[in-house]
Image (tube, rainbow, N blue to C red):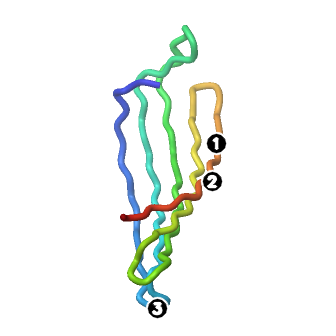
Amino acid sequence: MSENGTGFEIGVHDQWVSPSGKGATLSLRKIQWPKVRQGDTDTGEATSDILHMGWSWISGTPIITVWLMGLDIATLNLPHDRKLEMQFALGMRTDF
């Protein structure tokens, strides 16, 4: 890939009041790469699309821990090939 990629991201985030402490994010990121290399070969330009879905919820009163879960689905569209990647993540954030 090249560090000269440009693009945009469209997303929404919602934090529920009832049940309290739960939220969700949905976003789509589109990036145009003007110059892509695979090994020593220049393959030309490419595009990538990333769909991100995330969820969060809290535990503890007062709020001590925020639990995070995410799913990313990414495609890389090369001139003569297409790559697909899926990533699932689970994490937590806490404050001391």
The front one of 44 and 21 is 21
Q: Secondary structure at mark 3?
A: loop
In-image side of 6 versus 93 (left or right): left
- Picture coordinates of residue 35, whole percent (x, y): 43, 21
The front one of 63 and 74 is 63
In-image side of 3 versus 90 (left or right): left
Q: Residues within 10 Å of mark 2 (few under 14, many from 20)?
A: few
Q: Residues within 10 Å of mark 3 (few under 14, many from 20)?
A: few
Residue that mark 2 sits on = 88
Residue 91 in the image: above or below residue 13? above
Residue 24 in the image: above or below residue 1? below
- Picture coordinates of residue 45, whole percent (x, y): 47, 25
Residue type (three-letter) at the residue carrying disc 3:
Ser
Q: Residue at x 46, y 67 (%)?
A: 25
Question: For the residues marked 2 and 3, what is the alpha-carbon distance in whole angstroms?
Answer: 26 Å
Residue that mark 3 sits on = 18
| Tag 2 and tag 3, C-beta contact below 8 Å | no
The furthest residue to the top: 40
Residue that mark 1 sits on = 85
The front one of 37 and 71 is 71
